[in-house]
Image (cartoon, grey):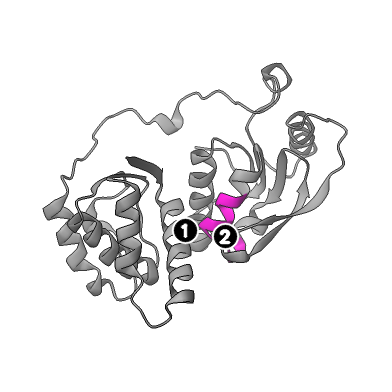
Amino acid sequence: KHRRCHFHEFMLDVHQRIHVYKANHPKADPIPPVAAALAKEATLLCFDEMQITDIADAMIIKRLLTLLLDLGVVIVTTSNRPPCHLYEGGINRSLFVPFIDTLNERLKVMEMTGTHDYRKGESSVTTSVSDSALACLPAYVYPSNTASSKTILDRWMKSSNDDADATIRTETIPVAMGRTLAIRRANDSCARCTFRELCHEPLGAADYLAIARRFDTVIVEDVPQLGGHVYNEARRFVTLIDALYEARTTLIVAAEVPME
């Protein structure tokens, strides 16, 4: 038995399992039983985009993956950085460093040194509507505040929905752990949000996964030039893109600057 998922999705599942276990066993250590349950469900775990961004995840994954390896689970993961750079600059990183040694000792680390950047290649846009309705529409427009850009986004909003005349509405979608998230402009298939709404608010992987699962197309407007001055916002944007990519959700971007 095997399981393949994005690392964000895996950690969300782990947090939910911990929450349920602690609700029933408030004084017990939840990590061993959670590891045992995961090992029973899959003997091969494959993760996409492994990254550690906060101390809670760092401490959980350190113990959880060590236990999974001890239980004989085979782990395969991709990451944008080598093990030595995981959780780099994080709070109390010294507590996480021993796990980096474990990864290097128990996993075979391979650097993929291909020269082709597939992120910059041509990609076809796929949604629930016919290609002919979308073929003439760009998926990345700039600058975002022009009348022509707004017209393109309006056409995406209509064309991505089976009913082109459907009313734009506010929709509240369920998020993990009993939370909800309000999408201010939505129809049956498409969500239209600003960069500020999605990336300036304290949202995380659970919120973005919920959006990706609910909508076939997501439009993000007013994306600024990303840099160190908006580090946290840029990191959330990357997490959003990861979630949309994993769910094969079409992303339409209106930005202040060109893509390059």
Left or right placement of residue 227 versus residue 43 in this view: right
Q: Main secondary structure of the magenta part?
A: helix
Answer with the quarter of the image where residue 159 lies.
top right
Left or right, 214 with respect to 41, comes to right
Q: Residue 223: where, in percent of width, then height?
A: 62, 49
**Magenta region:** 200-210
In which quarter of the view is residue 125 placed? top right
SS class, disc 1:
helix
Above or below: residue 186 compared with residue 151 = below
Q: Is residue 39 left or right of residue 258?
A: left
Alpha carbon of mark 1 to alpha carbon of mark 2: how far? 8 Å
The residue at the point 21 percent across, 56 percent down is 71
Q: Which sits in the foreground, 5 or 235?
A: 5
Q: Is residue 242 visible?
A: yes
Q: Which residue is mark 2?
A: 176
In the rendered structure, find residue 226 and report the number of the disc placed on it.
Answer: none
What amino acid does circle 2 point to?
A: Ala
- Residue 161 against residue 88 in the figure, above or below: above
Residue bearing mark 1: 12
